[in-house]
Image: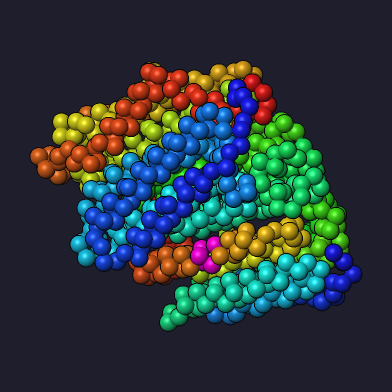
Amino acid sequence: MNPEALHTGLIETLSLTLVITSVAAVEMRRLKFSIVAYLCQALLIVGLLLSFAAVNHALYWWAATALVTKAILTPWVLFRAIRGVDDRELKPVIGFGPSAVIAALLMLGFYHLTHARTTLLAPTAMGQLEVFRTNLAVASTVFALGLYAVLTRRDAIKTVIGLCLLENGVHLSLVSLAPGLPETALFGVATEVVVTVFLLVYVIGGVRQEFGSTDTFRLHELRW
Amino acid sequence: MAGEVVTETSIVPAVVFLLPMLAGAIVFSATRLGRTFQQGLCIVTAALVTGMSAWMANRVVHGVVLTTWSGELRVDALSALMVVIICGIGLLTSVYSIRYLGERMAEETAARRIRIFYGLLMWFLGTMLWGCVTNNVIMLYVAIEATTLTSGLLVAFYWDRRALEAGYKYLMLLTIGITFALFGCVLLYAGAAATNKLTGASALLISEIRNVAPFIPRGTAAITIAFLVIGFGTKAGIAPFHPWLPDAHAEAPTPISVLLSGVMIKMALYALARTVSIFYPAWPQVTIFLVALGAFTMLLGIILALTQDDLKRLLAYSSVSQMGYVLVGIGLGTYLGCYGGLYHLLNHAIFKSLLFMCVGAVMYATGFRRISELGGLRRQMPITSACFFVGALAIAGFPPLNGFWSKLTVYLALARAGLWWAAVIAVVVSILTMVVMVRAAYRVFWGERGSSNTPTSVVREVPARMWAPMVFLAGMCALLGIYPQMPYPLLNRAAAVLATLGR
């Protein structure tokens, strides 16, 4: 493995754009644009995996898996879910201004954490390299933004998008943490995300029929 | 303690989870064949895997560890115990579901949805078995997430407002929770690989990671443990990650409630114990954390159960509480603690399945499930009421039933470890459990009927295919209570797998 072969500049640019797409996916009020932002993110992940693959050829397989599951299947399922309905998102709990501040703080925090204490998260020698540290910082930010979206958004479809971001964060971190992961394991992990999204969208379709909306705040039949 | 172990290659661990998967696929694809065929196939499959699990348990008791696919699948005593529980409860549930299902549904919707039910039921069993036989730490995550996916639609099976809400919460919360477990599993693998003592894919095998756990850096280990506890703890219903549990357990069809409460949450706790226990020898302070978490879980669960009027939610919260006992036992890390924890895991699978089946029988016969709407059923439903009482006394730890012995073992283990505060909480919770369960049993079967206006003459005892599994489980409660040494050979070896802190 030869770290010099990595296009560090390209990877850093892609990583930064990735964070921007996450914020866009969380903040866009029209669900359609939100899904487009997610699709862009998926393509960026494929690009990132391809540029990392210069030093680790197994990542070509990862890139192919990510292309099929994240950039094709998941957006397709999500677009089907909003077809024919009003795709304006319900008002979130926390608005745009505070969200942007939170996103920036998260990014700074994780960047600091991964650069000051890499051994904590990535005990490998490779994980100490600058690009992999940046990758971990970005992965953690995307993960945290996904969690933030799930917790603060009222619209059920938006929470599913948040869940997808969460999973994207984990997948990105695998590049630094577990580069030797066999394809079968990765394939299993990636497939399950698509099935989860499909099932959730299916159940949300039922919720829309029964409750007349996808507002998670109206799901309060069950208390205590 | 267990003696020498011999490793033996066998295809049975693979067959035991692939067979239900295949049966599920057949049920899904055989659209022409009728309901009898689907139910028959499921029961035959469940019976076959139960036989295989008994064979594996027998081999394991004789000091053999079964492996296949170059170590990817591995059945030691702990796995064998889980496989036996899953198969046994799965078989009884399949029998129970025949009459229970389709009772409240129109004929045309029933035909299609019952096929989906049995197909998913088989896949649900298959994925749970897969999780218990796999030795690959990433596949462990994949299998556990697969159990969520296969059971998600089963939870929302009735497709009404309550079921859909429960299904949405179930899929959402468990997927988020289990993503933390994926992080934990990946860190475990990365930590093991970074020790440079394992080559290639062997760093994925839990049995290999065990040997290098002390060399994993301290910070990495701490984060790994935290992620694993959050991830698998969510699925196991450990407080404060339990909010999905009462909704899902209460709104799912009763046979699925039995499997969720009786088996699935235990399988997640198995995953937790399997992965976290490898850190006990190097970091004994983890055990105190787990015992505290378990004590908190048992206390919170029973307090919430006290306030319930809905019988199924009451049982669900009681499951949270009882999982606390199992966690306290396994979390102690001593032989006695692990023995008590696993024994309680086995016992809880028996009596909680029994109690859920009894509540299902009450719902089947009366159409109600709130305590305030029920009362005086002992005359119309003598078998159900007797079974419920046995289950209630067993879960409350009343001698000479099985719950008494496992709880006693947990108390003794706590006392021996010097954790008196936890022992006191465990005893207090046991008394509260007695109050909750016996009060519910008394009101439903003895007390005066509440606001219900159903004529009492309509209510009849449930059909034999429903009460036979209940009577069998009630018999097991009594049998294991009178002969508590019966499961000793298997439990002894299973506890030895987890007990890394000596006796």
State the residue at coordinates (47%, 64%).
A200
Judged from this view, the residue extending furthest toward the front is B9
Q: Quadrant of the N terminus of chain B?
A: top right
* Horizontal and vertical percent position of residue A104: 75, 66
Residue A193 covered by magenta stretch: yes
State the residue at coordinates (12%, 39%).
B456
State the residue at coordinates (28%, 51%).
B40
Is the residue B268 above or below the residue B408 in the image? below
A13 lies left or right of B286:
right
| Front-most of residues B386 and B368 | B386
Residue B172 covered by magenta stretch: no
Is the residue A163 above or below the residue B148 in the image? below
| Front-most of residues A123 and B176 | A123
Stretch of the chain drawn in magenta: A192-197
A103 lies left or right of A219:
right
By secondary structure, the bulk of the magenta-drawn segment is best described as helix
B456 lies left or right of B41:
left
Tell me where residue B217 sits by quadrant.
top right
State the residue at coordinates (67%, 59%).
A182
* Horizontal and vertical percent position of residue A92: 56, 68
* Horizontal and vertical percent position of residue A88: 51, 78
Is residue B185 something that shows in the picture? yes
Judged from this view, the residue extending furthest toward the bottom is A84
Q: Quadrant of the C terminus of chain B?
A: top right
* Horizontal and vertical percent position of residue A20: 71, 74
